[in-house]
Image: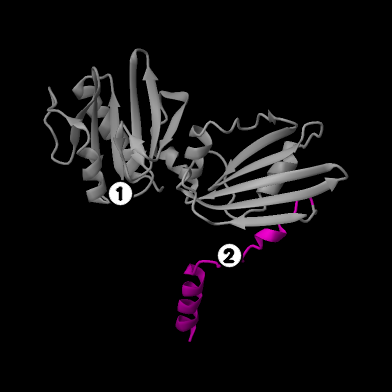
Amino acid sequence: MALVASVVALVAGCQKKVEKPIDYSSIAYKRLSPASFKADSSKNAEIPSLERRYEYRYAIMLGDTLGVTVLEFKSDVYALDYYMNSGHFQGSIPILRGNFLEQSFRADKRIFIFRHDSYRRYERADLEDYVRKFPGYHGGFPQAFLSLPFEHREQGRASIETRFFLGVKASFPVLVQSYRDGNLRWNVARSWDQVESDAFEKWVSGLKQVTPNEIVPANDCVYFEAGEGSYGIASRLSGGRVAVVWGYMSWPDLERTFFTASDRIFEARF
């Protein structure tokens, strides 16, 4: 009986906790219920990765209404891509649009856009508390970025590619980080998730492949020209992640950099 009880306890402990469903229509701002709420899950041709859009209005006081738009994407990588590359957002800096101030946040797979009268000041801490009421709250870069090497990173030179990568159409999102050590400059990229072999091969077919000098080509690597005087190495690692390194380096240096980066990407938890 003791053994059976132990097994039951172990199985119960391994089961994932079921998250309590969220009633999005009742999410309050500082205990204030929405004056109006609208949810839209129709497809958006301009933003293919957008899955849902929520619109809230909160009557803060007479003549002062807080509008909140929540854009929910397939995953945090698509939200980050749109937040960084669309040109619509300035992060923590309020933007004056007509008579309204607009502030934005990205948290996990959602982008939050707050609009209010320009004369009214909203504490950013209060807006952050509101954002935390949504499930799966997680700010900052996706944890997958942690798998890219830290040494010699160029600050502010991280990006997300979800449609084209190195000028070639790609069906998988990619995280890219730039590096610099003196006069040496290079880039390291990894796929957001596992990539099917046919998707990788289709992307590779669009690269200008070359035969490297001074090194012995590996059977599981693709060698390519990334621009005038710039070369790269790409591989679909065991398990399905894609690792790519390119830059203005000699082939031996590029190979060493690639193997260091690909080892980190392969061993990473995320």
Q: Quadrant of residue 174?
A: top left
Which residue type does callout 2 highlight?
Answer: Glu
Q: How far apart are marks 1 and 2 (CA)?
A: 29 Å
Q: Does the magenta stretch include residue 19?
A: yes
Image point (23%, 49%), residue name: 197
Give me the residue at 14% from left, 28% from top.
210
Give residue 228's position: percent from left, percent from top. Answer: 24, 18
Q: Mark 1 points at which residue?
A: 195
Q: In the depicted view, which residue is nearer to us: 61 or 17? A: 61
Horizontal side, residue 121 vs residue 115: left or right:
right
Tag 2 or tag 1, which sits nearer the N-term? Answer: 2
- The location of residue 42, given as percent across then percent down, is 52, 56
Q: Nearer the viewer, mark 1 or mark 2?
A: 1
Q: Is mark 1 on a helix, strand or loop?
A: loop
Residue at the location (70% across, 56% down)?
37
Image point (19%, 23%), residue name: 251
Does residue 9 sit above or below 209 in this rendering?
Answer: below
- Which amino acid is tagged 1? Val
Q: In this view, does 2 lie to the left or right of 131?
A: left
Q: What stretch is highlighted in magenta?
A: 1-30
Residue most toward the right? 62
Residue at the outermost bottom position: 1
Q: Is the residue under label 2 in contact with that under label 1 (CB below 8 Å)? A: no
Check disc 2 and report the residue beneath it: 19
**Secondary structure state at the residue bearing disc 2:** loop
Q: Which image quarter: residue 229? A: top left
Q: Judge from the rendering whether residue 95 lies leftward or rightward of residue 146; answer left or right.
A: right
| Figure colour scheme | one colour
